[in-house]
Image: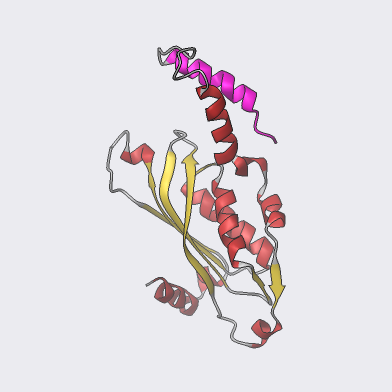
Amino acid sequence: MAIDQKAIEQHIRGILEALGDDPERKGLRETPARVARMYAEVFDGMNYTNHEIARMFDKTFEEDALRETGANDIVLVRDIDIFSHCEHHLALMYDMTATIAYVPNGKVLGLSKIARIADMAARRLQLQERLGSDIAEIMEEVTGSPDIAVIIRGCHSCMTARGIKKSSATTVTTTMRGRFDTDRNLQEKLFLLLG
């Protein structure tokens, strides 16, 4: 699916009119086109399925030594800055960080690819809860490991700037797959790494 920037321009123009402003006034003339370009960028992840994102960032390295060592070795990348937009209000989910961990299953993923997966999965109309699940699904496909953990912490402008207006409210979601969900020792090791 390609994002239809011309349709976005038309709708933004209509929104400006519905707000009682003149889309032809000097400051707004190029706003519909600017918004359409911005939406194409910030919602780029909507162009791809989780499987397509996995194929896009599938850069792994075989590591036979990982098969021979402990089965509880954890690769963890923390504090990956991401942003997304809440599908309920089209409101920005901001100051978001994702921490992603996995237990290698004979291969490791290039570290920058972990951040790229989180970023692309976030570039959709999204729920924070689903975002963690999407990242875990993509990570499982790319790494071949069923043992994935995703922790996301973020603020939501639908809570901070409107409605209840609680500016310091933070939402934390966890997605635990495989042994991160069932193995108490692995969970403790993860939470020790998280501090």
For the view shown, which residue lies furthest in the front direction? 26
13 magenta-colored: yes
The C terminus - image quarter = bottom left
Q: Which residue lies at the image location 53% right of the left edge and 50% below the top edge?
A: 131
Q: Where residue 76 sits: x, y (%)?
A: 51, 70
Overall secondary structure of the magenta section: helix
**Count of all numbered marks drawn on residues in the image:** 0
Q: Where residue 12 sits: x, y (%)?
A: 52, 21
For the view shown, which residue lies furthest in the bottom direction? 68
Q: Where residue 119 sits: x, y (%)?
A: 55, 52
48 magenta-colored: no
In the image, residue 45 sits, relative to residue 31, either above or below, namely: below
In the image, residue 53 sits, relative to residue 188, either above or below, namely: above
Whether residue 10 sits left or right of residue 82 in the image: it is: right
Which one is nearer the viewer's eye here, 156 or 81?
A: 81
Whether residue 158 sits left or right of residue 49 in the image: it is: left
In the image, residue 8 sits, relative to residue 127, either above or below, namely: above
User: Toward which corner of the image does residue 71 lie, by quadrant?
Assistant: bottom right
In the rendered view, how is the structure colored?
secondary structure
Q: Which residue lies at the image location 59% right of the left edge and 63% below the top edge?
A: 112
The N terminus - image quarter = top right
In the image, residue 128 sits, relative to residue 29, either above or below, namely: below
Q: Where residue 163 sits: x, y (%)?
A: 31, 33
Q: Which residue lies at the image location 57% right of the left edge and 29% below the top edge?
A: 36
Q: Which residue lies at the image location 34% right of the left edge and 51% below the top edge?
A: 170
Write the start and end of the magenta stretch as one range: 1-18
